[in-house]
Image (cartoon, rainbow, N blue to C red):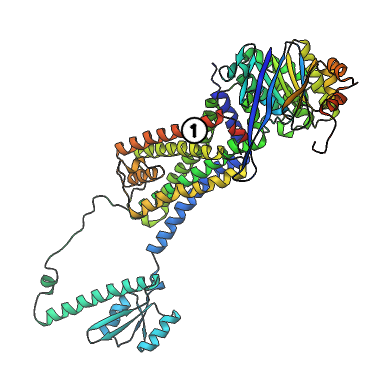
Amino acid sequence: MKNNLWNILKKELRELFRDKKSLAMMLVIPIFIPLLILGMSALFEMQMNKDVEDYNTIGFAYNLTEQEQQLAQQMQIKIVMGSEEELKQKYENGEIQLYITKQDREYTLNSDGSEISTYAANLMETYFNTYKQILQQNYLQENHMNADEVLNIITVKENVFKQDNFFTNYIRSYAFLFIIMAITVSATYPSTDTTAGEKERGTLETLLTFPIKSKDIIMGKFLGVSISSIVTGVISFLLAIVSLIVAQNVFSIFEGVDVMFSPISMIIAIIIIIMYSFFISGLCIAIASTSKTFKEAQSALTPLTFISFFPGMIAFMVGVVGTPIISLIPFLNYTVIFTDLCNGNIDYLNIAIMIISTIIYISIVLTYIIKQYKSEKVLFSK
Amino acid sequence: MIQVENIKKKFVRYKNKKEKVEFYADNGISFEAKEGEIVGILGPNGAGKTTLLRMIAGILEPTEGSISFDGLTYPKNEIEIKQKIAYLSGNTKLYDTLSTYELLKMCADIYDVPKEKAESRIQEICKMLKMENFLYNKIGNLSTGQTQKVNIARCLIHNPQYYILDEATTGLDIISSQIILEFMKKEKQKGKTILYSTHYMEEAENICDKVVMLNKGVIIQAGTPEAIKQETKTTNLRDAFFQIIGGVSDEE
């Protein structure tokens, strides 16, 4: 018996690559990846390198000594003097970012804990630590003691073997979540078009009169949608890598950090993308083939975009790490394995479990759809 | 030869969410169509013609009964049967994004037409149906008549033994329907078997060797047009039909 899988796949790919909407879904969505990576990098950079001029106007509700004034000048702190009430008013008006009150030897930093006042508080903590050190040195010298010996009785050095970068991991993991979402969106349109769309246009009836086994029809459709998703996923991943290289050269937050994936990590990342593309394509076709119209299928598939994104995002936020059990859980397994990959942990057992479980899930889903296409319900349900 | 024996097709219709009604679209249909015969399946809308032809084409599964093509039966020989038939309905839709040539090439591949024969077959059909001007145009850009020609071309590509034509002329202009009627006559001359459903009684009378009249899912009369007219003492199939069903009632 002739195998018509290739004929169906050829037809599906022709339709897919000639349809403007499918092409847009496949190729336009990945363009957002560089925007996401470069945008997030710029945001982090802005937060890290905040200009001191933005938070250095500090109110003092007490008279400063000459030494304090000198120190403030050295640390670029702009001094605003006034009573507590006046300073509170100025703080509320945004004229100062923090004000300090003093009672005997106790200083209080007053603020509402906003982002800008936190920067100001950090600045003032450094200021007071330095001031405290100066007072201690003066006291020891006045009492004829060696200040250096007392204050530096022990020394502590930091030796970082390999500089880990929170921002790199954060951006890479979020970029991957976006890639997952892009693959899902890319699978949604062609799977709707090839099942419910074909039913609605009336071409499915024509297709079912051809001497083709249901298995070949479904496999052809499944591979067509999978190829579309894989193209989106791989383009997104390549753009993510290029964006990370650009970000490393442009933003100082990546200084001294290797943002690039190792070759083996890149291969595993592409395997994860391919496995997810197969999984989501099968699932989308299964859901869309139960719908009678294009619109009905689109409504049924919309929640899938969110389902594909949220488990991974939550797992990333709470710091879930890969285990054999998690590697069995669809949606979650792909993100967790990728996050582990970003952290430099490659667990081949987890990867193998993810691949095998995905193949099993796809087989179950495809068997279900093939069964449906053998029955007249696929054309005349409801 | 196509043999249809005691075919029944039950559907379920829901009156509301809880109450369902079962009904037979076709109930105990039997007839046969021999080589070189055009058999007309006649009846008004809702008579069960489309359901019957869909079952014969293997799109629907009969609830009871059997259909055989030279001894081949569903579901055991489904692929072999489909290899020998061509199904064309008034609603048959084609792939708009493909060109006529690409569609015919795809059909030739699906029906396993040898590569060296496929090209000459496409050119031959193209010449016969006068499709040279739009062979490489996308189907979505063709007129209704041109699309129907492409549909006929797709049916011819594998040189089938059986044609199942379901209201293939409905909604077409006079020229497009003539193309289909001419095509049927030519194929009959080649010894092909054609099942042709229509509610245009005059059309059937002119072209069919035998007719099977359906109403409300059952055969009300079958035979040659001449025999039916003689039996009902009428001059045409239209009058014969109304005489058999007892005229047009309010219910109709």
- Kindly identify the residue that appears in the image at 39 percent across and 45 percent down: A332
Q: Residue A82 at what x, y percent from top left?
A: 36, 88
**Outermost residue toward the front?**
B246
One can see residue B158 in this view:
no
Q: Residue at x 81, y 17 (%)?
A: B208
Q: Is residue B219 left or right of residue A218?
A: right
Extreme residue in the left direction: A144
Residue B18 at x, y percent in the picture: 59, 45
Q: Nearer the viewer, residue A111 or B159?
A: B159
Q: Nearer the viewer, residue A59 or A222?
A: A222
Quarter of the image where one finds residue B15: top right
Which quadrant holds residue B116?
top right
Q: In the image, B33: left or right of B247?
A: left
Instruction: Say left or right for B221 vs A105.
Output: right
Residue A259 visible to the viewer:
yes
Q: Can you say which quadrant of the picture contains the N terminus of chain B?
A: top right
Which chain's residue wears label 1?
Answer: A
Q: What amino acid is at disc 1?
A: Tyr
Asked if A30 appears above or below B39 in the picture, the reply is: below
Kind of element beneath mark 1: helix
Which residue corresponds to mark 1?
A368
From the viewer's perspective, is residue B25 above or below residue B72? below
State the image quarter where residue B232 is shown: top right
Please state if B216 lies on the left or on the right of A379 as rendered: right
Please state the total of marks drawn on the protein image: 1
Query: How many C-alpha atoms fall within 10 Å of the one at disc 1: few (<14), some, or many (≥20)?
Result: few
Percent position (x, y) of residue A349? 30, 36
Residue occupying the point 42% across, 46% down: A176
Residue in front for this viewpoint, A292 or B98: A292
Q: Which residue is most to the right?
A: B235
Residue A48 placement (x, y as % from top left) = 37, 63
Q: Quadrant of the C terminus of chain B?
A: top right
